[in-house]
Image (cartoon, helix red, strand yellow):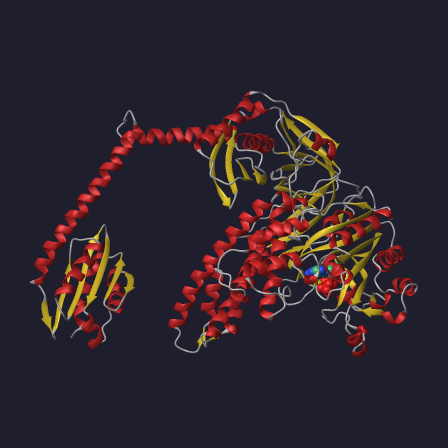
């Protein structure tokens, strides 16, 4: 059974059981501060488990892209070494939100595996939760009794809290689970050791394929459990592992999910998979990682230096490094695998196909830049090796290479061992740990349980229509972090405050009670579909009702920028072409930022056309047409664009200004005329094939023109009110260049003369020709003189100095013979004498320079120079 059939059979099975089939949510999470990436099928449905929202159908099934490379679930270091853990994998799942429970979940899992997929019952084991004294929980006998109906009792294993109790995080919904394992070893192997003894023992052919989680408790901040009002089912089956079983192979990498990618790697690298373990690991690493990186770029997460982007960058670098070390690939090649990948997976995940070109560009550029880093790192490492006197390279040095230059530690270790050197791993790990502690301390945060003041269904957002409302606080909690200290998070029954989202910043404002007491709302954010208002203090009369008021000025400026963002998007597609796609946007009150796919720098003419296009629509006074709660299909049919990486419901909100129409939850001006004017202030590259425009509107444009005008007049003033300041500036520049040339040639002449004079001033001390002298030359002039004399005289010791613009410079020249015979070293001389001019420097044994900030000390330096030769 090929993988496409495996996937579609799963979905149609649950569709028949009255489940709604939904597409995979984007992999990068936007409104969950506890999680960067979706790491299990349930993550996109957290709002339902937490009771913050109600699904339309309380039975759902899907296949979800999951990434396990950070936080609680991190399989990164396993990947490549074993044959069944991936960074990115698909999790097939079925859910019941307060609907069916253990009986149906178990019955259907069994039916699907044994009847639909036809897996032999005799290779299956299941597990149930054995109970936990800490939590005061007994064994899950309910699940045990149901399983007994399907499978013989000697195949039902009891598992501990680690394997058989699933928790979403430190807090929140959790419950016992039943895992289903397969034993795909040969009959011979099975005869030797029973599969029962290998379950959960990291055996590559006795692996877990499906986990059925029975959500029935809530874990509170103090660690105690309380029963959930509604019980839920959450199941997750590893798609690639299921394919392995159904295709009768022994490794996920031998399924049709990975084989085509591996074949392509073989072609490109001229290596054969299955011949040598180290190369095999590398091939598995690369075939896995290219998927993770490609999928996340498709979901809008590009590699970068921080947060989720940094995680992606590290995955790609891991792949590059394995290719570099074990497959001998010193130039970019991973991007060439994207073609095969998008051919294989493009049907199930159209975002891959649609963005293939972009994904290739981004990966290729990342590869190039990391390969350059590796090259530089190798040079630095060689230098470290040269400087190391013992047989061990210090952990600190290796850490610096790793931390500052991004040079991987395992590569350092490998290269050192090839050179017969050791690495002080302990020292390295200490440095690493120190760094981790520092960043952990900076990001540490504690969150109290919610204090519930009033039971409330969904919190209503009224901020599209009003900036003021009478509200009640339904719940609040305290959050403490190093960065912000104590903060409170408040939830209302309804709110006019727009929560950060769709690129637009959250509203600010205040709450006022009937006594005139005021609390400021510093920010508004959405978390698992709840709108959270951040305050520094808790309102005094917390149970009363409040007038909630949004800062109207900030909101208005932000709206100008948001509407302008839509017009800019339209303009770019019009002026540059429809390949332009939004790749990120930030809408602030002061400016807007828009990232989009496009392959080259915008010309001045293009920028002007884009600006004019937007301004014409502002002048056109286009009214806002808002369509709330329309079916997504209808909005798309109207011409609305949906974005990759964005999660949309069945019904959407569409915003139209003239011919610009977008799916958007943000707030907008009532008429484009409100924007007054639009001005692009910068355009540049963010990554390969991605450009960024920053622009301003309204008051910010007025400020911009005012400031530019001021600068212009100041400049004109400095140019003696020249009629044509640009020309005046050009001629000044020309004049300047000419003067510089003249000075250089004068200095050269001067140096020649000086050399003639200096010859006569040489003093012979202990057979050394000595001279210490201050000259009116620049650094290059000093060097010139020194080398010239050095070429003419033997046994020379020169200390030349200059004093330019309040700075002092020392140059020391020592003939090679002296360096050898007397063990003199110019580098050491300038380091020591540099002290007198309050500076330092260095160089080679025969020539070195030092700079300092105290020209007054030059005389002292001269005074002490003789000491080196007497
Ligand atoms: P394992 O013990 O094998 O790491 P797990 O206990 O971490 O699995 P769950 O969190 O229960 O797994 O996830 C549900 C299912 O997802 C698993 O039964 C397995 O089939 C699959 N799965 C989990 N992690 C991975 C991974 N890194 N790569 C591929 N499939 C995975
Ligand atoms: Mg795991």
- Is residue 505 visible in this depiction of the protein? yes
Residue 84, image x, y percentages: 70, 64
Q: Quadrant of the N terminus?
A: bottom right
Residue 8, image x, y percentages: 78, 50
Does 180 appear above or below 348?
below
Q: Quadrant of the C terminus?
A: bottom left
Name the residue at the left extreme. Answer: 760
Name the residue at the right extreme. Answer: 149
Quadrant assignment, res 664: top right
671 relative to 417 in the view: left or right:
right
- Residue at 48 percent of width and 66 percent of height: 399
Residue 558, image x, y percentages: 58, 33
788 relative to 612 in the view: left or right:
left
Residue 594, image x, y percentages: 55, 38
Quadrant assignment, res 624: top right
- Residue at 46 percent of width and 64 percent of height: 401
Give the camera-side residue of 793 and 492.
Answer: 793
- Residue at 66 percent of width and 59 percent of height: 259
- Is residue 129 visible in this depiction of the protein? no
Name the residue at the top extreme. Answer: 620
479 relative to 160 in the view: left or right:
left
Q: Quadrant of ligand 1?
A: bottom right
Count of numbered circles in the view = 0
Give the camera-side residue of 434 and 678.
Answer: 678
């Amino acid at each position: 059974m090929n993988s496409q059939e495996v996937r579609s059979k799963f979905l149609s099975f649950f569709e028949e059981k009255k489940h709604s089939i939904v597409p995979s949510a984007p992999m990068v999470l936007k409104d969950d501060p506890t999680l960067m990436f979706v790491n299990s099928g349930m993550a996109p449905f957290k709002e339902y488990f937490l009771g913050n929202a109600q699904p339309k159908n309380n039975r759902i099934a899907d296949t979800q892209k999951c990434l396990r490379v950070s936080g609680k679930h991190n399989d990164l270091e396993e990947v490549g070494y074993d044959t069944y853990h991936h960074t990115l994998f698909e999790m097939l799942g079925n859910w019941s939100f307060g609907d069916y429970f253990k009986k149906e979940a178990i019955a259907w899992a069994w039916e699907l595996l044994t009847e639909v997929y036809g897996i032999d019952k005799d290779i299956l084991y299941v597990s149930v939760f054995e109970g936990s004294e800490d939590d005061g929980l007994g064994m899950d006998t309910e699940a045990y009794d149901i399983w007994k109906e399907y499978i013989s009792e000697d195949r039902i294993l009891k598992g501990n809290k680690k394997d058989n109790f699933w928790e979403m995080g430190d807090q929140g919904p959790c419950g016992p689970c039943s895992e289903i394992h397969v034993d795909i070893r040969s009959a011979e192997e099975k005869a030797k050791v029973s599969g029962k003894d290998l379950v959960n023992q990291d055996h590559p052919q006795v692996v877990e394929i499906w986990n059925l989680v029975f959500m029935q408790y809530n874990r509170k901040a103090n660690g105690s459990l309380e029963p959930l009002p509604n019980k839920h089912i959450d199941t997750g089956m590893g798609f690639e592992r299921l394919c392995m079983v159904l295709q009768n192979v022994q490794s996920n990498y031998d399924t049709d999910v990975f084989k085509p990618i591996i074949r392509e790697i073989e072609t490109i690298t001229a290596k054969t998979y299955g011949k040598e373990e180290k190369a095999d690991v590398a091939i598995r690493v690369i075939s896995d990682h290219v998927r993770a990186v490609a999928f996340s770029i498709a979901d809008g997460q590009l590699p970068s230096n921080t947060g989720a982007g940094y995680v992606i960058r590290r995955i790609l670098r891991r792949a590059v490094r394995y290719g570099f070390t074990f497959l001998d690939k010193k130039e970019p090649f991973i991007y060439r695998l994207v073609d095969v990948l998008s051919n294989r997976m493009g049907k199930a995940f159209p975002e891959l196909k649609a963005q293939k070109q972009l994904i290739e560009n981004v990966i290729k550029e990342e590869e190039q830049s990391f390969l350059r880093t590796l090259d530089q790192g190798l040079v630095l490492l060689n230098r470290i090796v040269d400087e190391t006197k013992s047989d061990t390279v210090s952990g600190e040095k290796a850490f610096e290479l790793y931390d500052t230059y991004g040079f991987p530690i395992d590569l350092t270790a490998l290269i050192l061992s090839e050179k017969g050197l050791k690495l002080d791993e302990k020292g390295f790990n200490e440095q690493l740990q120190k760094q981790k502690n520092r960043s952990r301390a900076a990001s540490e945060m504690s969150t109290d349980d919610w204090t519930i003041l009033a039971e409330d269904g969904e919190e209503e957002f009224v901020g599209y229509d009003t900036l003021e409302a009478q509200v009640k606080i339904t719940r609040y909690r305290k959050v403490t972090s190093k960065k912000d200290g104590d903060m409170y998070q408040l939830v209302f029954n309804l709110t006019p405050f727009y929560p950060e989202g769709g690129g637009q910043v959250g509203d600010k404002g205040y709450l006022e009670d009937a006594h005139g007491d005021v609390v400021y709302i510093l920010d508004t954010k959405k978390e698992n579909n709840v709108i959270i208002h951040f305050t520094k203090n808790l309102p005094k009369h917390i149970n009363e009702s409040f007038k909630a008021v949004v800062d109207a000025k900030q909101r208005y400026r932000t709206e100008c920028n948001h509407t302008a963002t839509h017009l800019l998007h339209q303009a770019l597609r019009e002026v540059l072409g429809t390949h332009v796609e939004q790749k990120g946007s930030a809408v602030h009150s002061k400016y807007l930022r828009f990232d989009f796919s496009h392959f080259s720098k915008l010309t001045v003419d293009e920028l002007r056309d884009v600006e004019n296009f937007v301004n014409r629509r502002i002048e056109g006074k286009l009214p806002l047409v808002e369509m709330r709660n329309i079916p997504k299909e209808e909005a798309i049919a109207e011409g609305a664009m949906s974005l990759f990486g964005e999660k949309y419901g069945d019904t959407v909100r569409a915003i139209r200004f003239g011919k610009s129409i977008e799916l958007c939850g943000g707030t907008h001006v009532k008429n484009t005329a409100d924007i007054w004017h639009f001005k692009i202030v910068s355009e540049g590259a963010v990554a390969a094939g991605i450009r960024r425009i920053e622009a301003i509107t309204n008051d910010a444009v007025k400020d911009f023109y005012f400031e530019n005008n001021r600068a212009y007049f100041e400049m004109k003033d400095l140019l003696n009110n020249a009629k044509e300041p640009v020309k005046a500036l050009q001629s000044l520049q020309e004049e300047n260049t000419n003067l510089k040339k003249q000075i250089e040639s004068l200095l050269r002449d001067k140096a020649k003369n000086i050399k003639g004079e200096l010859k006569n001033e040489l003093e012979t001390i202990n057979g050394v020709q000595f001279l210490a002298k201050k000259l009116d030359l620049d650094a290059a002039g000093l060097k010139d003189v020194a080398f010239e004399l050095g070429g003419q005289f033997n046994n020379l010791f020169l200390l030349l100095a200059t004093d330019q613009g309040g700075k002092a410079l020392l140059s020391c020249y020592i003939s090679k013979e002296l360096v050898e015979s007397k063990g003199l070293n110019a580098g050491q001389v300038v380091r020591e004498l540099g002290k007198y001019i309050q500076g330092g420097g260095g160089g080679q044994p025969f020539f070195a320079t030092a700079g300092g900030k105290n020209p007054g000390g030059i005389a002292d330096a001269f005074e002490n120079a003789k000491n080196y030769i007497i």
